[in-house]
Amino acid sequence: EHYAEALYCMLRKCRRLVVVVGAGISVGAGIPDFRSSTGLFQTVKDDFKLKGSGQSMFDSSVYKDAATTSMFHSMVNTLHTISQDAKVTNFHQMLSKLSTEKRLLRLYTQNVDCLEISLSGLETAVPLPVKAPWPKTIQLHGGLQKMVCAKCGWMAPFDPTVFQEDRIPECNECRELDSVREVVGKRTQGVGRLRPRIVLYNEFNPDGEAIGKVTSSDLKARPDGMLVVGTSLKVPGVRRIVKEMSAAVHAANGMVVWVNEIDPPAAKMFENCFDLILKGDCQEIPSILERWE
């Protein structure tokens, strides 16, 4: 109860709250997390009888051969279907409320399910602009709402029917441009391939520069509180954001809160980072706060 009161006071007091979330916030919506024993890495490993980790299905090397491309397409389509059918959770609703109450400076999400961006006050922009103004929600790893041509950058709403086979689908935009060039006697430039607009391991993030600009701006804005929810903080870029933001929050006498079923990472970089550690389901937080209202 003492912890609940501390969290309630923090969220009521904050005017520039930063929230960093991972797959744990969407488990309540029926979307699997990644790293738990029932998470996506494990089920992908079992379903496709992989020798290594299921994480390899989220690596840029999936495009190296037809077999892994086919598995990747199958998995992405499944994840897209689950995400489309999922209902936003109480925790997602709470984030929306914090935004409409003008308490939320920024939501950084590692999730590709796009649940948060369906709510008012949590909109995003794809691609992310390099200059301000920036949207409230920053998708750190892209999202399954779009597909993109790796060559010309043409973008459209994600269409699962395009990703049914082991072949990487061709971009119609590139094809049309090529046929026009052919007609006028110019050399063709080749046709790009379509892919989901999500960032895989070991590949360049097309929004990377913009994300760097947003975080710099948010650090200067003197954030007065931070929630880190449902993430194991395994991704280096996200670890850095949390580390730098926590220093800025502490400089403004704010509080940094960890919410997860697991402990925060024991890494030295996170020493003295978290002021309050709440172990449990993040979906309980909205009802705990309501009791204090």
Image (cartoon, rainbow, N blue to C red):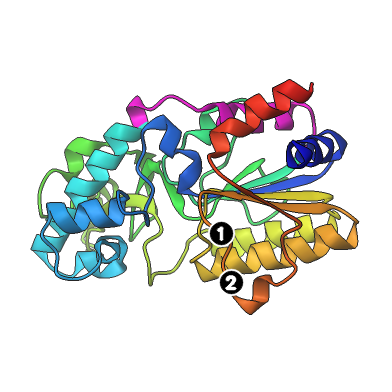
- The stretch in magenta equals 84-103
Magenta span: chief secondary structure: helix
Q: Can you tell which quarter of the image residue 35 is in?
A: bottom left
Give left or right: position of 4 versus 188: right
Q: Is residue 28 above or below residue 224?
A: above
Q: Is-magenta flag for residue 282?
A: no
Label placed on residue 266: 2
Quarter holding the N terminus? Answer: top right
Q: Is residue 133 above or below residue 85?
A: below
Residue at left offset 25%, top offset 70%: 61
Q: Is residue 14 above or below residue 257?
A: above
Label placed on residue 263: 1
Q: Can you tell which quarter of the image residue 124 is in?
A: top right
Q: Identify the amino acid type marked 2.
A: Ala
Is residue 178 at least partly visible in the picture?
no
Is residue 147 at least partly visible in the picture?
yes
Labelled pair 2, 1 in contact (Cβ < 8 Å): yes
Quarter holding the C terminus? Answer: top right
